[in-house]
Image (cartoon, grey):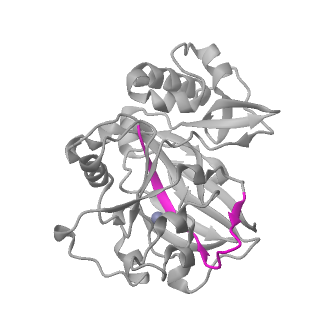
Amino acid sequence: MSSLYTNSNDSKVSLTIEQARTQVIWYAIATYERDGRTAAGIVVDGALYDAEALLARTGGANVPLDVDTLVAHWDATSAATLADLERAARAVAEGTAGVAPQAGYRLQVPFTPRRIFAAASNYYEHAREMGTELAPREESTPYMFMKAETSVVPTLADVVMPAEAQRVDWEVELAVVIGRGGRHIAVADAFEHVAGYTVLNDVSARDLNRRTDYPFKHDWFRGKSFDTFGPFGPWLVPRACIAEPQNLRMRLAVNGETMQDGSTSEMIFSIAEQIHYLSSILTLQPGDVIATGTPTGVGMGRGIFLKPGDVMVASIDGIGAIENALVRA
Ligand code: ZN
């Protein structure tokens, strides 16, 4: 129980008792670019290894070597694939892999989301800071909207502030990745449909979220779907590596100052309830991403907004951190 796994940016991820008991090795699946080549990577102890090279040494014939394909076929291949990936990660952790970590690489988005569903107002304190009056939970269901999947950018990519936006804001969110599709998924079965987790910064132009030229007050599609408004990553952590997804500390800092510091334990509608709700409307598909809502501490609630040059770091314990600077178009 003494081991610590390090992810990016030096944040320590301690093993939970349950993980230690079941001997789960923490690892993540990444997509990286180096010298013009894009490839899959496996992250262990904060270092990134080329998946192909690592699996060649540890016997991973089952693994498709691009993460889009891996996620798209997650359920069909998951048992064999996860065994291969976990064996490779274990070999690294035990020092028997014989493969050097990569240097000089650039992380890409871990995979291209099929769709992005996002929960509005899913934390009570955040609802309060936004002046949102909610019905009692028992009389309510999740409020989901769609954010364009083309908005995603990797860590260290710039977020481009459109010329027409003045009030650009941050939102750290746990992103749940669907690995097994389905319709009418019961709450009790929901996690069987989860491939893993990553971080999404649901960047929002608050002024463009509002409309006065229509009787409809909100236009979240517009305010949240601009190119680059979805910093996403840094990598995909398989479900088995996160013992308590409903108890993860999540933070967002701007220029080093912590703005959001919450926990996924504060969600109004849980991950499982969101999966259940969405699957009552449509068939969830592998590669779909659910951005599960943001805790209190956004700029809107503080009366401050991002300026060009500001740097956001969105992080979730047990997953990792993404860093993105704002630039003017
Ligand atoms: Zn959001």
Q: Assess whether residue 172 is covered by the magenta stretch.
A: yes
Q: Is residue 215 visible?
A: yes
Q: Position of residue 276 (x, y in %)?
A: 25, 49
Residue situated in front as seen by the camera: 89 or 155: 155
- Residue extending farthest left: 138
At x 59% / y 54%, what residue is drawn?
A: 151
Q: Assess whether residue 35 is covered by the magenta stretch.
A: no
Q: Is residue 171 visible?
A: no
Q: Within the image, what quadrant is residue 215 found in?
A: bottom left
At x 75% / y 73%, what residue is drawn?
A: 308
Q: Within the image, what quadrant is residue 269 found in?
A: bottom left
> Which quadrant of the rendered structure holds the C terminus?
bottom right
Asked if residue 321 lies left or right of residue 129, the reply is right
Q: Position of residue 185 (x, y in %)?
A: 23, 42
Q: Which residues are magenta?
A: 158-178
Asked if residue 278 lies left or right of residue 87, the reply is left
At x 63% / y 62%, what residue is drawn?
A: 313
Q: Position of residue 43 (x, y in %)?
A: 61, 36
Asked if residue 231 lies left or right of residue 175, the reply is right
Q: Position of residue 284 (x, y in %)?
A: 34, 41
Q: Within the image, what quadrant is residue 101 found in?
A: top right
